[in-house]
């Protein structure tokens, strides 16, 4: 199928040609006709397969051209970085039209955004919090909004955005088209979506939480964080020396410390990115990474969704995410647009259960392959504080998996009690 067969109009076809897209991806092929027909749509597809364009093209076609009216379409996303990413897609596809788009997100003063809104806008792309803030300041008139898109809807519903979304649903027209897109859509999120979807069409071009086939997945057991750092340096300096890489960690402190360590040990430039960084700093780091001015970005999951840098060759999970959805989104930063990529996960003893749970949710064709640690990497001794933390983490995971589990201390006491009983019986 071609974009012409999807009834895309000429000005958008010209923009598509400029982007170098030769044919629509499966999610675009299935979603665009249904969205253009006015249906409510739930779109589920692997990361890096063109989900943003799948809703951006029909939304732009519905808007057609700029009018002296309030906004007519609203796209809500969970993070500032994703708001900028989606905004760029809309601007790129609308380059041969006069359609006006704006990105609304926190971290910057609202005055400039209010001024742009007062000059007129057709499509709003923003985070729920900033949208509500500017609405309450009188900067947004909602009565003409006919289309609402939730991008990465699982994260927005699952991570505390529901109160804000419910408030937004109260102030936008009830007669509208609703579009929900993500790579993962668990059942509990589907139940929440029933609050505002009426007879939706569910488009699932691949099973949810499925990584793209072009990503080679590897895993290596590593005893502690210091050994992990040696391994990450080895991968970036010896195995993927010329390639752009994303290193994912779980906490802001890890992102800060590991980025500083890598700055001293590898070439090509390194930046750290997490939610404590100023907005301008985060956008600048992402811009440098996208342009290739730096080779490595160390990030928390703030960058695991929606960030499209096709040149990213490798993703390294320095720490294992606690659920399969975050894993899929992390490794989806490579292998984009059907290119080949590598995802290498390093796990310590406390993360083994997390990784096993992730593997149990992946289809058999997406096997994570064992990759032994090279002999050249020095193995550091695990310090007492880290060993203690690992033991606590393992204990927590066992308690969560088994409600009858009493804890490591109780198990140790029970075994010692059994040994003393055996000793008494032998003396008798």
Image (cartoon, rainbow, N blue to C red):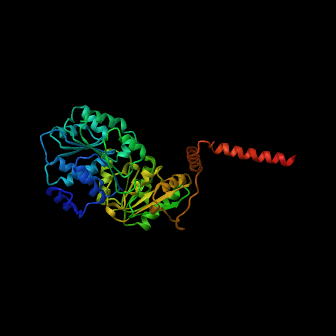
Residue in the foreground of this view, choosing between 256 and 185: 185
- Where's residue 84, x and y in %? 27, 49
Q: Does residue 386 appear anywhere in the picture?
A: yes
**Residue plotted at (37% across, 42% down):** 157
> Where residue 79 appears, x then y in whole percent?
33, 45
Lateral position of residue 276 relative to residue 104, left or right: right
**Which quadrant does the N terminus fall into?**
bottom left
Above or below, 208 relative to 114: below
Say whether residue 88 is visible.
no
Q: Position of residue 323 (x, y in %)?
A: 46, 50
Specify the farthest residue to the front. 199
Left or right? Give the position of 33 relative to 190.
Answer: left
Tally of numbered discs: 0
Report the front residue among 217 and 392: 217
> Quick check: 194 above or below 286?
above
User: Who's the residue at 36% across and 43% down the image?
Assistant: 156
> Which residue is most to the left?
68
Q: Nearer the viewer, residue 296 or 422?
A: 422
Is residue 372 positioned above or below 412 on the image? below
Where, by quadrant of the figure, is residue 217 drawn? bottom left
Left or right relative to 55: residue 347 = right
Residue 421 position, x and y percent, is 79, 45
Residue sitting at x 22%, y 32%: 138
- Residue 36, above or below 310: above
Tell me if 244 is positioned left or right of 233 in this view.
left
Q: Quick one: 297 or 142, which is closer to the camera?
A: 142
């Amino acid at each position: 199928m071609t974009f012409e067969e999807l009834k895309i109009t000429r000005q958008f076809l010209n923009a598509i040609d400029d982007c170098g897209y030769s044919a629509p991806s499966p999610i675009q092929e299935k979603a665009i006709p249904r969205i253009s027909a006015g249906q409510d749509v739930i779109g589920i597809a692997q990361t890096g397969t063109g989900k943003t364009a799948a809703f951006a093209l029909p939304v732009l076609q519905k808007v057609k051209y700029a009018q002296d009216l309030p906004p007519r379409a609203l796209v809500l996303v969970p993070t500032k970085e994703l708001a900028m990413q989606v905004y760029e897609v809309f601007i790129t596809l609308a380059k041969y039209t006069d359609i006006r788009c704006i990105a609304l997100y926190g971290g910057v003063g609202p005055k400039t955004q209010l001024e742009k809104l007062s000059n007129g806008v057709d499509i709003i792309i923003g985070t729920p919090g900033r949208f509500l803030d500017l609405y309450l300041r009188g900067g947004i008139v909602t009565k003409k909004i006919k289309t609402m898109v939730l991008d990465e809807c699982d994260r927005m519903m699952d991570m505390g955005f529901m109160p804000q979304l419910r408030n937004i649903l109260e102030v936008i027209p009830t007669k509208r088209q609703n579009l929900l897109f993500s790579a993962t859509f668990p059942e509990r999120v589907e139940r929440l979506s029933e609050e505002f979807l009426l007879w939706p069409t569910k488009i699932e071009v691949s099973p949810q939480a499925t990584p793209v086939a072009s990503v080679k997945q590897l895993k290596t057991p590593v005893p502690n964080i210091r050994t992990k750092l040696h391994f990450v340096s080895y991968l970036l300096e010896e195995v993927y020396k010329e390639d752009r890489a994303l290193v994912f960690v779980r906490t802001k402190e890890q992102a800060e410390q590991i980025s500083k360590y890598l700055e001293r040990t590898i070439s090509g430039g390194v930046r750290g990115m997490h939610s404590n960084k100023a907005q301008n700093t985060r956008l600048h780091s992402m811009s440098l990474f996208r342009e290739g001015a730096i080779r490595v970005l160390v990030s928390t999951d703030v960058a695991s969704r929606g960030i499209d840098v096709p040149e990213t060759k490798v993703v390294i999970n320095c720490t294992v995410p606690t659920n399969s959805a975050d894993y899929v989104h992390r490794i989806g930063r490579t292998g984009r647009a059907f290119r080949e990529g590598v995802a290498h996960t390093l796990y310590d003893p406390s993360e083994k259960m997390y990784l096993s749970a992730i593997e149990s949710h992946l289809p058999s064709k997406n096997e994570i392959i064992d990759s032994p640690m090279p002999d050249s990497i020095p193995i550091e001794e695990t310090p007492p504080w880290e060993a203690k933390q690992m033991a606590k983490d393992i204990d927590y995971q066992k308690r969560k998996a088994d409600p009858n589990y009493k804890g490591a201390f109780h198990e140790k006491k029970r075994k010692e009690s059994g040994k003393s009983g055996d000793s008494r019986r032998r003396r008798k």
